Amino acid sequence: MDAIFLRLLNMSITACYVILAVILIRLLLRKAPRIFSYILWAAVLFRLALPFSFVSVFSLVRISTQPVPEDIMFAASPQIQSGIAVIDHAVNSSLPAPAMGASINPMQIWIFLGEILWLAGVVLLLGYSVFTFARLHRKLRYASHRDSNIYELAGGGAPFVFGIWKPKIYLPEGIYEAERNYILKHEQTHIKRLDHVIKPFAFLVLCVHWFNPLVWVAFFLMSADMELSCDESVLKQMGGEIKKDYSSTLLSLSTGRRIIGGCPLAFGEDNIKGRIKNILNYKKPTLWVIIITVLIVAAACIGLISDPKGSGLQEVDSQGGSRHPSVYEDGLTVEDYAEQYVQITIAGLEPIKDVIGYQIVDSKITKLERLDRFENLLDYPVELWRIEYRLKPDVDDISKVQLGSGMNVIDGWITEDSSAGKPLMLFSYENSVRRFLDVIQTGDGINGNGNTVAGRETLLREWFEGRELLRRETYEGKHIMVKFLLSTGETCQLLLSQPVTKGATGIWCVERWMDGNGMVYYNTPETDGTALDYYRQLQEQCDKGQNPQLLKPLNVALDYINNVLGQTQVLPGQLEPQYNATAEDFEETPVSRYIGFVSEFEEFYPGNFSVHLNPAEWIEADKSGKPRKLSADLDHLPDGDYIYTASEYPLSFQAIDETRIYLIDPMKPKDDLNLKEVTPEEFKDYLKKTANSKPPLFRVLTKDGYVQEMEEQYLAPEQFVRISMPEGKDQI
């Protein structure tokens, strides 16, 4: 009994990691068909139901799958080893140790009490399920048989499916024929997909793991995905034009009383609001969305149901104590890892063979070589290996099948190329032990590339920083952050560092920059060697009196903005430096400020809408000079005429629930410029009223890609000038 209970605890703890991973992936796939989110829960069910798994180097599980050792009841110092230091320390410090000479270990008592409580919970839940099953079965004796496995039940209520071996569909009496067709199609889809078997089995697993709150969360989210995916299947079969009628049917049936009363062998229709919203927003996915989503789901499922190599095994340090479980304890050669990667790639293509029109019948690795060994990136060396391979499809003419973006064919074999670049295998050598870390792609060249040592170094830096293994700064020491405006009005910022020598004699470089949406772009110097070697050469030249402008950080910043980013309109006086900045200062996304005329409002769904902004130009009060762009950082608008030119390509900004909108209050004196906060609906109505007259002038603040605040600006009627452009022209 003890062994079963401890095994169950380990399964439930591992499942917590998998549940959180599925929830995260589910959020990333929220715009994909819900059937894929539904499939992801199979990995959770696998972890909760089966006490075994298989080992794979591509496992996504980064914790020990046996955190609670089987001998913990008899250990002199009981400890768990989850692989997460913070959790291990917190739990281990609270575990009771046996007293000297005691006849029983306190852990034995606690585990015994845990077993009793666990069994009581299982019996209680199963007993309640049997009771509700019997109660519902009695009510169904009065149902009228209509056709095949279809029954009608008096008294209203929502439709549901009941039974496992011979499932029956129960409908409320008196529904219209059109509603009946939608409901039957929905319930028949449940039966066809064996949902009437899956959900009771999932409930049984829930009864076993009732003590784990994340399992309850997983059960309810899985049930929601089951219903949403079933609705989408109905729309796919009957056509998108039924959205409104189908939604009305769900709404009308939701007002009836519940019949099934929590019985796990019958399931009806819950979450009506979410289902209606999903139905109305449903769009048929494109082929590429399906292909990419299938690959993501297949890779995620394989990674989450497989154990990491060495999981649960303990390494022993030189003092004889236990260390972090060796998740990637090396027992394979580089060639073994390369072959496994190719086989995983082939396995990812198998589920979509009917979509892409072929399947892989043969494979071969054509090149496997070490590209780089970086000694100073981390506290231990890391290596990048290039792998090139070929996949043989089962078709004679490969030109007749559909290849993914970036894929190439050589002599009838599909290469390793993809839209994400080429694969590179990453290994670490901590304590002289080789560990496989990941396969990274050479990318699109924005942040690093696979063509140069410096480019690959940038790829690795981005990878390690994303996993908190490196600080988000390339060079330690003093930093300067410089803000500037793009030609669009967006505020961006540079992070400057001294890569070699610190102080007055050290050169400066731009190590990275951030746009107004919070995207970070690394600066990779064009060199055949490492970035540090490149800057060392520049430092040596500067020490000899060459390139003295590299000693002036603002000159370096302006040169990068003008010549690398192509923002030639930026002048020295427009730079906003922040001296003694930190890496954390740079991580804060800059606020962008725009001034212009709002010309259009588009609502996607409640609380999420976009506005179109035509940037304002102005002519000074004395009418001298050409129209000029407004500086978005002015505290007060200058005097003069404000020019509105309807552009074919206005700026578009997305607003959210937190966006604050302020309009001029006409009931207050204009000199006071009193503003009132309005709702998106009031803002929309205001734009409609001004559509055929003077469009309102607004100051717009954005951050992280979203509008933070919109504030209307007062203009006298005589200050407004509308310019009608000739056809095909969109600027003065």
Image (cartoon, rainbow, N blue to C red):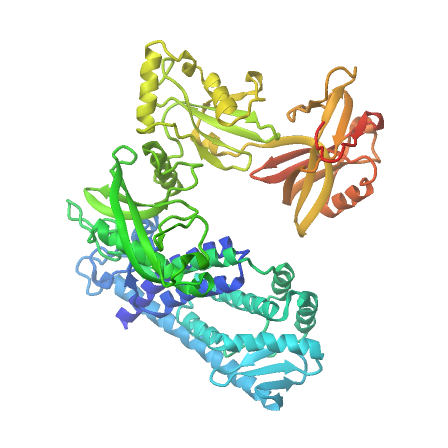
Find residue 575 and report its horizontal and vertical position in percent: 55, 20
Q: Nearer the viewer, residue 104 or 86?
A: 86
- 663 on left or right of 414: right
Indicate the position of residue 689 as horizontal and vertical percent values: 82, 42
The answer to whether residue 316 is left or right of residue 677 is left
Q: Quadrant of residue 40?
A: bottom left
Query: Which one is in front, 330 or 285?
Result: 285
Residue for point 74% across, 39% down = 599
> Residue 297 appears in which quarter of the rendering?
bottom left
Locate residue 427, reporting x and y percent. 27, 44
- The quarter of the picture where the C terminus appears is top right
- The answer to whether residue 65 is visible is yes
Residue 238 sits above or below residue 161 on the image: above
Measuring from the top left, give residue 73's x and y in whole percent: 24, 63
State whether residue 162 is above or below residue 440.
Answer: below
Question: Residue, x 83% and y 37% (percent of image)?
Answer: 693
Q: Quadrant of the N terminus?
A: bottom left
Furthest-top residue in view? 545
